[in-house]
Every structure is written in C-alpha cells, then in structure tokens.
Image: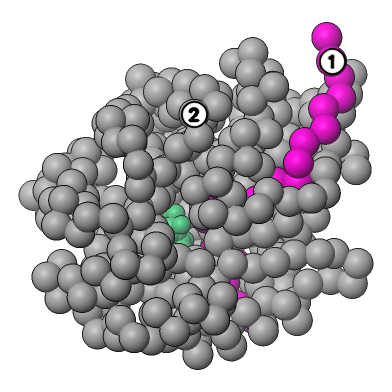
C-alpha cells in the first residue's frame, strides 16, 4: 500500500478569508497548502465593484506570510445594481475570475444579494458573452420551503430557468450538498461545474443534531441525509471533470458559533488535505485525489494547473493539528472530522 502521494499543488475554488485580524489569522492556514483560491466577496460591506476587489486583493497580498506563495483569485458580489461594464472591465484586466450570486438572505452577509433575477439579466448576459463564470449559492430563501429542500428547489425554480434564459453562461454550483445537485451537474454536458466542500464529505445532518447540538457542524447549505453525503463522495471520487474542491472554509469565532443564534460556517482550511486523503483512500480513489483538488478546477476556470507539487504521507500514528486557530477577534475552532487523521502534507 502506498504511504506517500505527490500531487499537483491544490487550489481552493471557494474560500472565505474575511478581513483585518481574521484574514491575518486564517490566510496562512490556506496558503500553506494551496496555491490559489477563489475568494468569496461576502465582506461587510461586500466586494461589489472592480475597485473593491482590487483593494481587497491588496489587503490579502499584504497578509501573506514571508516565504509563502499564494494567488487570491478575486470575485465580485452580484447585486441588483451591479454594472455590467464594471464587471467586464474587472474581468478584462485579469483581476476578477468569477461573479458570486447570493440569493438575498440565503446565508452569512447575503442581504445585498439578488431578489429579482430579472434585474441582473444584463450582467448575466454580459458574463455569458465574455465567458466569466457565475458562482451560485444555490438555495431558495422562500420561508415556505424546508431548509433541507432549499437546494433541490433552487435547481428547479431558479438555476435551470436562469441557465436556459442565458445560453452560454458558465455556472459553478457552489458547495453542493445533495444527490439532486450531483445529478443536475451530470445531466449537463457543458458550462456547468460544482464545488464540493471537505465537511460535506464527512458529516450528514445527524452529526449536527444527534446527542446534542453541534454548532461547529452547522454551515449553509446545511448538511443533508446520509444518502446525499454518499452521492457527494461518489461524485468527488469519480474523477469527473465537473466536480472540484471548494472548501467553503468559513471562519467564525467560537463566541459567534457557540451562541443561541450561531453563525453558519465550518473552518476546514487547516486539515482539509489530511481529511481528503483519508476520504479518497476510503473510496479506493487516492489516484483521483489530484483531479479533485488540483486539475478539474483549473480546467473549468480555463487556467493552467499549478506547476509545483505537494507530497502527503500516511503515518503509523494519528497526526496532531491545532484544534483552534487564535485570531485577534477570538479563537476559531478547526473542523473535527470525528476520527483520527493519518495523512499529512510533508512537502
Ligand atoms: C459562509 C460564511 O460564513 O461566509 N457560511 C457557510 O456556512 N458556508 C457563507 C456561505 O458560503 O454560505
Ligand atoms: Zn461559502
């Protein structure tokens, strides 16, 4: 059995870095292993214009520790007032690699998102024309729809109609959590990809709720039934070019998570590669880990794969990793997969 694997250096196609003290604390956790990441724009206030993204990129670059290499791939937060010409200019300059669609109210800092999809039609049409991907938080916000059904309903009510109305629009379904999401991506040959998080390969909804409520397992979209988790694992481990890693690593302080109204988000940057090696080994798919973490994402985003490599080694004894990251805003709990990890990045 192989105890060492070498991969093209991975990228994270969905990451929350936040700003200020939190950015400072969490950025090294990603930059240690990942060459690039698609940076989510849901700051307060959000990253809406090209100029906002340029300024945020500068703040991220300043926070990279000495000796680490990291290329933040910037996104714009789509609002009903977004100007198609500003988006096109930010793309043409090479600054912006995607636009993020949050249905208003769907998740953390999404209140400036979209309510009326007709209002963003000109922007979507421009994006289709220039080949700029739309990253979609795929959940409806209709209070009448059960939270566990919101992804499946979004596909039928919003995503499919928007894609049909905008031929050529390239869409990433972000952090899919259901077999419905997997099937929808598979039934579309072109212009559609999906990111899968680390934690949705590990937890189902029982992990959040059985034996006491576990705020550190609460994220959006919320983890679903076991059958859905198994569908996500099969998709990730299949090597299918349309599925790639987007950790959705989303730091919140313990104070904000362990609360009567806890924030959504799992912080997985620290141990993602160890967990993924564990999962892919269990799936007898270690040979396809590189496709998921390092090759399929660049193919979708029409970027070259990274030139450098990383090596992971499996140890005899469980590895140690920090249980919390200490930020200037307070401690952030690292995602606990609930079992010991044996793989670690060694080079
Ligand atoms: C994200 C966050 O905290 O910004 N939270 C989460 O549960 N995933 C927002 C998001 O991606 O939905
Ligand atoms: Zn996210």
**Is residue 36 on the magenta stretch?**
no
Q: How is the image coloured?
A: one colour
In the rendered view, would you say 232 is above or below 12?
above
Q: Residue at x 25, y 63 (%)?
A: 103
Q: Is residue 255 visible?
A: no
Q: Residue furthest top?
A: 1
Q: Residue at x 54, y 54 (%)?
A: 302
In the rendered view, would you say 29 is above or below 186?
below
In the rendered view, would you say 122 is above or below 247?
below
Residue 242: % across, % down = 45, 37
Residue 347: % across, % down = 90, 43
Front residue of this view, candidates 221 and 60:
60
On screen, residue 45 versus residue 287, left or right, reads: left
On screen, residue 66 versus residue 189, left or right, reads: right
Q: Residue at x 54, y 81 (%)?
A: 93
**Residue 114 occupies which quadrant of the picture?**
bottom left
On screen, residue 164 versus residue 94, left or right, reads: left
Please give the residue where the numbered disc 2 appears in the rendered image.
240
- Circle 2 SS class: loop
- Give the mark nearest the N terminus, 1 or 2: 1
Label 2: few (<14), some (14–19) or many (≥20) C-alpha neighbours in 10 Å: some
Please give the residue where the numbered disc 1 appears in the rendered image.
2
Measured Cα–Cα span from mark 1 to mark 2: 23 Å
**Is residue 14 on the magenta stretch?**
yes
Front residue of this view, candidates 318 and 165:
165
Give, as a single range, the part of the protein colored magenta. 1-20
Whether disc 2's CB lies below 8 Å from ligand 2 is answered no
- Circle 1 SS class: loop
Asked if disc 1 and disc 2 are in contact, CB closer than 8 Å, the reply is: no
């Amino acid at each position: 059995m192989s105890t060492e694997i070498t991969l093209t250096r991975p990228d994270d196609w969905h990451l929350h870095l936040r700003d200020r003290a939190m950015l400072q604390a969490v950025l090294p956790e990603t930059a240690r292993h990942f060459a690039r990441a698609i940076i989510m724009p849901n700051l307060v206030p959000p990253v809406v214009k090209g100029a906002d993204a340029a300024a945020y990129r500068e703040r991220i670059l300043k926070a990279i520790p000495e000796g680490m290499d990291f290329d933040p791939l910037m996104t714009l937060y789509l609002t009903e007032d977004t100007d198609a010409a500003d988006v096109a200019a930010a793309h043409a300059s090479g600054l912006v690699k995607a636009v993020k669609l949050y249905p208003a109210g769907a998740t953390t800092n999404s209140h400036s998102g979209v309510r009326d999809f007709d209002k963003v039609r000109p922007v979507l049409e421009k994006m289709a024309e220039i080949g700029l991907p739309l990253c979609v938080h795929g959940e409806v916000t209709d209070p009448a729809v059960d939270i566990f059904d919101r992804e499946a309903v979004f596909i039928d009510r919003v995503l499919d109609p928007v894609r049909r109305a905008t031929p050529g629009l390239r869409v990433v379904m972000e952090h899919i959590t259901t077999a419905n999401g997997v099937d929808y991506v598979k039934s579309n040959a072109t212009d559609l990809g999906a990111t899968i998080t680390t934690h949705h390969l590990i937890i189902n909804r029982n992990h959040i709720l059985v034996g006491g409520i576990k705020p550190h397992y609460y994220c959006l979209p919320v983890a679903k039934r076991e059958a859905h988790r198994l569908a996500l694992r099969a998709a990730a481990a299949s090597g299918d070019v349309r599925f790639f890693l987007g950790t959705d690593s989303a730091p919140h302080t313990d104070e904000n998570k362990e609360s009567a109204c806890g924030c959504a988000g799992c912080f997985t940057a620290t141990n993602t590669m160890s967990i993924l090696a564990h999962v892919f080994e269990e799936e007898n798919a270690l040979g396809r880990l590189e496709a998921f973490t390092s090759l399929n994402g660049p193919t979708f985003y029409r970027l070259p794969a990274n030139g450098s490599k990383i090596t992971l080694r499996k140890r005899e004894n469980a590895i140690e990793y920090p249980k919390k990251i200490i930020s200037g805003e307070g401690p952030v709990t690292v995602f606990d997969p609930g079992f010991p990890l044996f793989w670690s990045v060694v080079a």
